[in-house]
Image (spheres, rainbow, N blue to C red):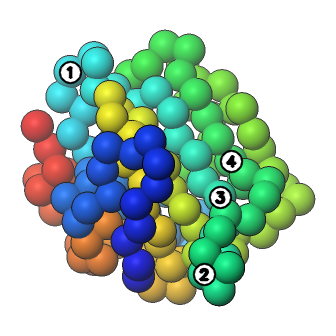
Amino acid sequence: MLLVAAPGLAGCTALDPIGLRKDGKIITVVIGRQCAPERYLTRLRVVNYDRSKKAEVAPTLWEIEATRPQALKSVVLGTVPDGYVARTNNLATQTIGDTVWLSVTIGDTYGNLFDIENLRDGKVMDAALKVQSEEEFHKQYGC
């Protein structure tokens, strides 16, 4: 996996408090460090990424934005949590590719590339490529 920086992002390091978990065909975004209201999830965006072109593949797969931000430890792609609205939802017409760019705003904006084939059922892959249980993830990236 390649960790890349993008304009406007505060993070993009191995310590970014974001990860992905796969459960069969379900992909879940796992989020840490939401320790105060100003750090609650306000935006989440997932887009396919073409490594050969080093570019996002339009259109965005899925994007949500908070109407009432709250601390969410995880969000299942395609399921809009209470207090959020879908800004973009192309999951029904566009497949999740081999690589996705995940961007999460929790006070600061963090983003990383994730190779879907490297995800393991029931485990979280964090920005450092570490595969672990969700409990271990939140212990590492908790408050």
Mark with earlier residue (1, 3)? 1
Mark 4, mark 2: which one is toward the viewer? 2
Mark 4: which secondary structure? strand
Q: Is residue 98 left or right of residue 143?
A: right
Is residue 70 depicted above or below 47 in this figure?
A: above
What is the spatial separation of the Cα atoms under label 3 and label 2, in whole angstroms? 12 Å
To which quarter of the image does residue 98 belong? bottom right
Tell me the residue at 37%/71% (across/down): 3
Q: Mark 3 vs mark 4: which is more N-terminal?
A: 3
Residue position for label 2: 51
Q: Residue furthest front?
A: 7
One can see residue 43 in this view: yes
Q: Pointer 3 and pointer 4: residues touching (CB < 8 Å)? A: no
Label pair 3/2, CB-CB below 8 angstroms = no
Disc 2 is placed on an element classified as loop
Q: Where is 26 relative to 130, above or below?
A: above
Image mark for residue 62: 4
Q: Earlier in the sequence, mark 4 or mark 2?
A: 2
Residue 26 in the image: x percent, y percent? Answer: 59, 64
Q: From the viewer's perspective, tell me whether residue 142 is left or right of residue 125.
A: left
Q: Marks 1/2: CA distance?
A: 35 Å
Q: Nearer the viewer, mark 3 or mark 2?
A: 2
Q: Nearer the viewer, residue 64 or 75?
A: 64
Residue at mark 1:
36
Give the amino acid at mark 1.
Ala
